[in-house]
Amino acid sequence: MAVGSATWITRAKDNMKYKRLYSALTDRSTGVICDQIIVLLGFYSRKDYPDKMRRIKYKDPETKITYEFITCNFKTEAITICKLYKQRWQVELFFKWIKQNLRIKVFYGTSKNAGYTQIWIAISVYVLIAIIKKELKSPYSMNKILQILSIGIFEKIQLNQAFTKIELSDKITGPRKQLILFDS
């Protein structure tokens, strides 16, 4: 691996066909089950990636789930590779949270600064809605509050009125202000 070149870590597919070239000694107390140098055997996978790669099998001590990683990084310790992937997964979860809660469907700018600006605006809106929900002790979900705000954005109404549940009655009490055209 040349200086300045990128490395990658990903999960291995269950049906991955490979040939083991070398197995390194592992400390199983860390959760690392095996650390191997492999080459892919499938026609298309071998054609797409003919180089050697590293396969690490890891059992998470907390969840007892076994993971299989492949990487082009041959220098870093196996347990560090596993921890790096776990951190990568936290980043994936963060972006999933952004998509679900901040309603960012498309990035309108192409620069790094445009992306940051759009994310910060979305986070600011989310925090403001959370403050509204808490201050008004609203029974509505954050999404419902956002819907109410987006519909009534041009109406001159106080926030506490917008988020108060009003039960409308079919029966009219008191004098009617509208004329009745037909007797019912």
Image (tube, grey):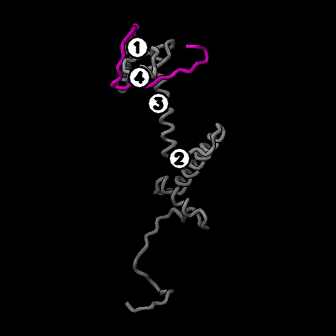
Magenta residue span: 1-29
Distance from the alpha carbon under mark 4 to that under mark 1 = 13 Å
Look at the numbered disc 4 and give the secondary structure of its residue. Answer: helix
Q: Quadrant of the N terminus?
A: top right
Reading the chain from its start, which is encountered first: label 4 or label 2?
Answer: 4
- Tell me, yes or no, whether the two marked residues, 4 and 2, touch with CB atoms within 8 Å: no
- Tell me, yes or no, whether the two marked residues, 1 and 3, touch with CB atoms within 8 Å: no
Distance from the alpha carbon under mark 1 to that under mark 2 = 39 Å
Q: Position of residue 5 (x, y in %)?
A: 58, 18
Taking the spot 53% from the left edge, 20% from the top edge, the residue there is 7
- Label 4 Cα crowd, 10 Å radius (few <14 / some 14-19 / many 20+): some
Tag shown at residue 105: 2
Task: Name the amino acid type tagged 3.
Answer: Trp
Taking the spot 48% from the left edge, 90% from the top edge, the residue there is 179
Mark whose residue sits in front, 1 or 3: 1
Mark whose residue sits in front, 3 or 4: 4
Mark whose residue sits in front, 4 or 2: 4
Residue 86: in magenta span: no
Look at the numbered disc 1 and give the secondary structure of its residue. Answer: strand
Look at the numbered disc 3 and give the secondary structure of its residue. Answer: helix
Reading the chain from its start, which is encountered first: label 3 or label 4?
Answer: 4
Q: Position of residue 127 (x, y in %)?
A: 57, 47
Residue 23: in magenta span: yes
In the drawing, does residue 146 fall left or right of residue 173?
right
User: Mark 1 sits on what residue?
Assistant: 38
Distance from the alpha carbon under mark 3 to that under mark 4 = 24 Å
User: Mark 4 sits on what residue?
Assistant: 45
